[in-house]
Amino acid sequence: MTQLSTTSRTTPAGPVVTLSGELDHHSAPQVRAMLPGLDIGPGQQLVVDLGGLTFCDSSGITVLIAARNQALARNAGIVLAAVPERVRRIFTIVGLDQVFPTHPTVQAAEAAWAPPAG
């Protein structure tokens, strides 16, 4: 049985979603279901913490793209944090390293965010 733990919290920069375990065909719907409930506004960013991810297949990639689409639809950004090397390798092979900005830690992702001027 696939095991995936998800947590989320809200920061001034936007929501931080932490995924731990296996992101695959069995667990991707769990992540997809939480996306509409995220409180993300224009100019904010969604941080997806992948530091605890042990596996990611094409279904996991699809749900991350859905998260990106959700953020962009709300005029917000998305960044990935703490991407494990084995997952980073897959992302590089399929070109997602060109789609998702990444940071070494959640703290670095939060520090890199700047509120919109205005």
Image (tube, rainbow, N blue to C red):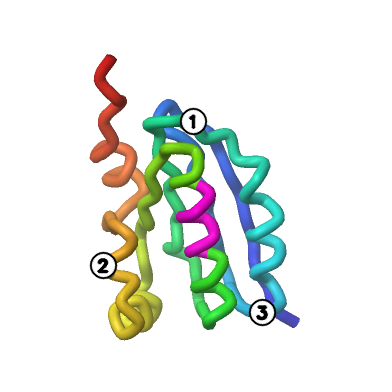
**Residue 44 place in picture, x, y as percent:** 40, 34
Residue at 55% from the left image edge and 38% from the top image edge = 9
Q: Which residue is mark 3?
A: 25
Judged left or right of residue 93, residue 40 is: right
**Disc 1 to disc 3, C-alpha distance:** 29 Å
**Residue 70 place in picture, x, y as percent:** 53, 49
Q: Residues within 10 Å of mark 1 (few under 14, many from 20)?
A: some
Q: Earlier in the sequence, mark 1 or mark 2?
A: 1
Judged left or right of residue 18, residue 117 is: left
Residue at the farthest top position: 118
> Which range of residues does the magenta coloring cover?
64-70
Q: Is residue 14 visible?
A: yes
Q: Which residue is mark 2?
A: 98
The front one of 25 and 118 is 118
Judged left or right of residue 93, residue 74 is: right
Q: Quadrant of the N terminus?
A: bottom right
Q: Quadrant of the C terminus?
A: top left
